[in-house]
């Protein structure tokens, strides 16, 4: 819309060029060029902001995915720890030790 307005203004100035003094025409053309420059700067700034926002949205989506995985892992670990019970036989205790050692390995992997 801004570009269309600038083109309309440019056409209007061109149409009225014979009816206005040269000095006024120069001022209008200078102002028109300033408008074109400012419009270009605004377009660039909007494009930069759009790209920045898209990047931030992408980062947010990655964060949410990581957060979901972390919460799921924490829930699983919490349930495993809540279900802790004392065991009587050596074999049961060794199985439990292996289970908790594997949880420790998993914890170390999630820390990185």
Image (cartoon, grey):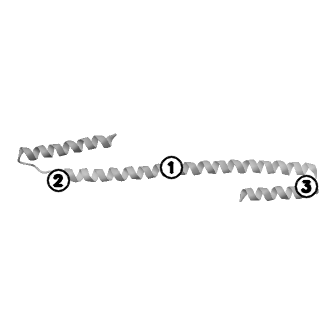
Where residue 91 appears, x then y in whole percent? 8, 45
Q: Give the mark nearer the N terminus: 3 vs 1.
A: 3
Residue at 58% from the left image edge and 51% from the top image edge: 50
Residue at 23% from the left image edge and 45% from the top image edge: 103
Task: Tell me whether the residue at label 2 lies in contact with that at label 3, contact meaning CB atoms closer than 8 angstroms.
Answer: no
| Residue labelled with disc 1 | 56
What separation in Å lies between label 2 and label 3 (alpha carbons)? 88 Å
Where residue 45 appears, x then y in whole percent? 64, 48
Residue 17, numbered circle = 3
What separation in Å lies between label 2 and label 1 (alpha carbons)? 40 Å
Is residue 8 positioned above or below 97 on the image? below
**Placement of the C terminus among the 4 image quadrants:** top left
Is residue 14 left or right of 95 when viewed as pictured?
right
| Residue labelled with disc 2 | 83
Where residue 68 appears, x then y in whole percent? 36, 53
SS at mark 2 in the image: loop
What separation in Å lies between label 3 and label 1 (alpha carbons)? 49 Å
**Placement of the N terminus among the 4 image quadrants:** bottom right
Residue 74, numbered circle = none
Specify few, some or many for label 1: CA neighbours under 10 Å numbering under 14, 14-19, or 20 or more.
few
Is residue 75 left or right of 95 when viewed as pictured?
right
Q: Give the mark nearer the N terminus: 2 vs 1.
A: 1
SS at mark 1 in the image: helix
Viewer-nearest residue: 98 or 82: 98
Is residue 26 left or right of 82 when viewed as pictured?
right
Residue at 28% from the left image edge and 40% from the top image edge: 108
Specify few, some or many for label 2: CA neighbours under 10 Å numbering under 14, 14-19, or 20 or more.
few
């Amino acid at each position: 819309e801004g570009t269309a307005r600038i083109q309309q203004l440019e056409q209007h100035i061109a149409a009225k060029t014979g009816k206005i003094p040269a000095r006024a025409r120069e001022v209008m053309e200078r102002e028109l060029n300033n408008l074109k420059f400012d419009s270009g700067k605004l377009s660039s700034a909007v494009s930069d902001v759009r790209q920045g926002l898209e990047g931030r949205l992408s980062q947010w989506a990655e964060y949410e995915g990581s957060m979901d995985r972390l919460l799921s892992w924490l829930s699983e670990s919490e349930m495993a720890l809540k279900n802790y019970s004392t065991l009587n036989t050596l074999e049961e205790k060794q199985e439990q030790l292996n289970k908790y050692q594997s949880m420790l390995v998993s914890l170390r992997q999630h820390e990185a």
